């Protein structure tokens, strides 16, 4: 990331290998007005062409809303309200939103996207932290709980879409969170 982002000691990376021609997962990161870095990973439940469109709308809404406020729990509650009113019954979006400062302070919230794997320092084992709320669009009034933690030098956060957890190993078994 360029030093102008205010998070010049942070390395943000992502990897994606779509399972089909119609992608339902997406990720993004962008600088916030206060100098922190916004992080997003989401997955739409719709396997048809509407899934990528819905996910693109969620991403755009988050980017727009972070111009006003950057509390991950507030952001997800706002997007949830919009989705609940417009998504067909039985459809939902899982989403992780985090705000990371150059001091390693990460304030995040997850709606159905989890577990979130956290290693607070280099060579430290990962803790699997559960999602703090159900997926977006399921309940009309979502009240997610944000989590704050500090990453030390070499600390890492790994957020995986369900495509990783639902993949099969060589024996045809789900990989799962382990």
Image: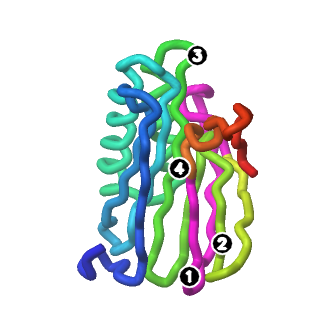
Which percent across, then down, holds residue 143?
63, 43
Q: Which residue is mark 3?
A: 90
**Which is more N-terminal, label 3 or label 2?**
3
Q: Which mark is residue 119?
A: 2
Figure check: 11 above or below 175: below
Which percent across, then down, holds residue 156?
57, 71
**Which is more N-terminal, label 3 or label 4?**
3
Which residue is found at the position 42% from the left and 77% from the top? 10
Q: Residues within 10 Å of mark 4 (few under 14, many from 20)?
A: many
Which percent across, then down, holds residue 110?
59, 49
Identify the residue at the far front of this view.
170
**Gap between marks 2 and 3, in whole Å?**
34 Å
Kindly report which numbered mark, 1 or 3, lies closer to the viewer in this rendering. Answer: 1
Which percent across, then down, holds residue 54?
38, 28
Secondary structure type for disc 1: loop
Q: Residues within 10 Å of mark 2 (few under 14, many from 20)?
A: some
**Which is more N-terminal, label 4 or label 2?**
4
Quarter holding the N terminus? Answer: bottom left
Do residues under tags 2 and 4 come within 8 Å of each other at their CB atoms? no
Q: Which residue is mark 4?
A: 96
Secondary structure type for disc 4: strand
Kindly report which numbered mark, 2 or 4, lies closer to the viewer in this rendering. Answer: 2
Q: Which mark is residue 12?
A: none
**Gap between marks 2 and 4, in whole Å?**
17 Å
Query: Which region of the structure is painted magenta?
Result: 133-159
**Which is more N-terminal, label 3 or label 1?**
3
Do residues under tags 1 and 2 come within 8 Å of each other at their CB atoms? yes
Q: Is 23 in the magenta?
A: no
Do residues under tags 2 and 3 come within 8 Å of each other at their CB atoms? no
Q: Which mark is residue 154?
A: 1
Kindly report which numbered mark, 2 or 3, lies closer to the viewer in this rendering. Answer: 2
Q: Quadrant of residue 140?
A: top right
């Amino acid at each position: 990331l360029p030093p102008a982002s205010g998070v010049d000691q942070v390395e943000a990376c992502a990897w994606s290998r779509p399972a089909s021609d119609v992608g339902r997962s997406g990720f993004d990161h962008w600088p916030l007005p206060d100098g922190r870095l916004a992080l997003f990973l989401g997955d739409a439940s719709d396997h048809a062409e509407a899934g990528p469109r819905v996910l693109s709308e969620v991403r755009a809404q988050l980017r727009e809303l972070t111009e006003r406020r950057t509390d991950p729990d507030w952001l997800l509650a706002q997007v949830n309200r919009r989705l609940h009113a417009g998504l067909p019954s039985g459809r939902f979006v899982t989403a992780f939103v985090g705000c990371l400062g150059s001091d390693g302070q990460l304030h995040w919230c997850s709606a159905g996207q989890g577990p979130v794997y956290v290693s607070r320092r280099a060579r430290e084992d990962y803790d699997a932290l559960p999602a703090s709320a159900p997926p977006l669009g399921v309940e009309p009034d979502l009240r997610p709980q944000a989590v704050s933690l500090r990453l030390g030098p070499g600390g890492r956060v790994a957020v995986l879409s369900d495509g990783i957890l639902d993949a099969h190993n060589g024996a045809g078994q789900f990989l799962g969170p382990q």
